[in-house]
Amino acid sequence: MKRRFLLFSTHLLTLLLGFGLGVYLLPIITAPDGPAAEVLQQAERTASFQGEFRRDLADSDALHWGEGRVLVGPDQVVLQGRLAPGPDYKLYLSPTFVETEADFKRLKSTMLRVGDIKTFENFAVPLPPGTDLSAHTTVVVWCETFNEFITAARYR
């Protein structure tokens, strides 16, 4: 009986570990290349605002973080930096700075969902036509699948 329990436990642990690694590694393996250097340089020239993703936000941790410079221009949001890898990242513009999961959930209805983030080192996400940047102050990265706050940057 003890042997069966040990066998079951080790197999279950292996299955859970494999699933966890798959959830973490699959987005990394399938991520497309980041934007070309020309896109990043163009964003620097045309950015109307900039901010910074920092690792020290309240709900950022070892698995949920971002770091680097965020450039907000008339037609796109660009990150020159890195994000912790994960699935189903979405970019939002918020009228209020948020740095916790609770704040995000409370204010989500006031935010503009900009688009999907598919890369973890540098990204360029186009803004929807007619986006009013002055109606927002903050760029937020959120994981929809797991309802996890990743990072945020105040840009004005």
Image: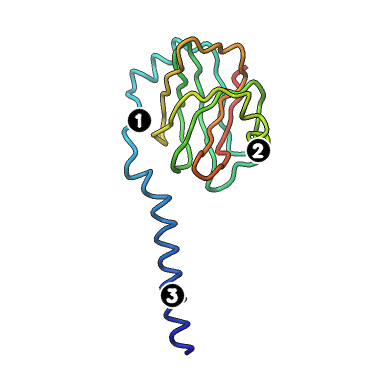
Crowding near the residue tagged with mark 2, few <14, some 14–19, many ≥20 C-alpha atoms within 10 Å? some
Find out whether the residues at labels 2 and 3 contact each other: C-beta distance under 8 Å. Answer: no
Q: Report x, y in % for residue 93.
A: 56, 23
Q: Residues within 10 Å of mark 1 (few under 14, many from 20)?
A: some
Mark 3: give few (<14), some (14-19) or many (20+) Cα within 10 Å.
Answer: few
Asked if the residue at tag 1 contacts the one at tag 3, i.e. Cβ–Cβ closer than 8 Å, the answer is no
Q: CA distance from mark 2 to mark 3?
A: 36 Å
State which mark lies toward you, 1 or 2.
2
Q: Which mark is residue 150?
A: none
Residue position for label 3:
10
Using the numbered discs, state the Cα–Cα distance from disc 1 to disc 2 in whole angstroms: 27 Å
- Percent position of residue 126, x then y: 42, 19
Between discs 2 and 3, the one toward the N terminus: 3
Helix, strand or loop at label 1? It is loop
SS for callout 2: loop
Residue at figure coordinates x 51%, y 17% from the top left: 72
Q: Does residue 13 lie above or below 97 as drawn?
A: below
Q: Secondary structure at mark 3?
A: helix
The amino acid pointed to by label 2 is: Thr
Q: Is residue 57 above or below residue 93?
A: below
Residue 134 is situated, as x and y percent measured from the top left of the image, at 60, 11
Tag 3: amino acid:
Thr
Numbered disc in front, either 3 or 1: 3
The residue located at (56%, 25%) in the rendering is: 139
Which of the marked residues, 1 or 2, is nearer the chain's N terminus?
A: 1
Label 2 sits on residue: 100
**Left or right placement of residue 66 versus residue 102 in this view:** left
Circle on res. 34: 1
Q: Nearest the camera: 34 or 107? A: 107
| Tag 1: amino acid | Gly
- 46 up-or-down from 62: above or below: above
Q: Are marks 1 and 2 in contact (CB under 8 Å)?
A: no
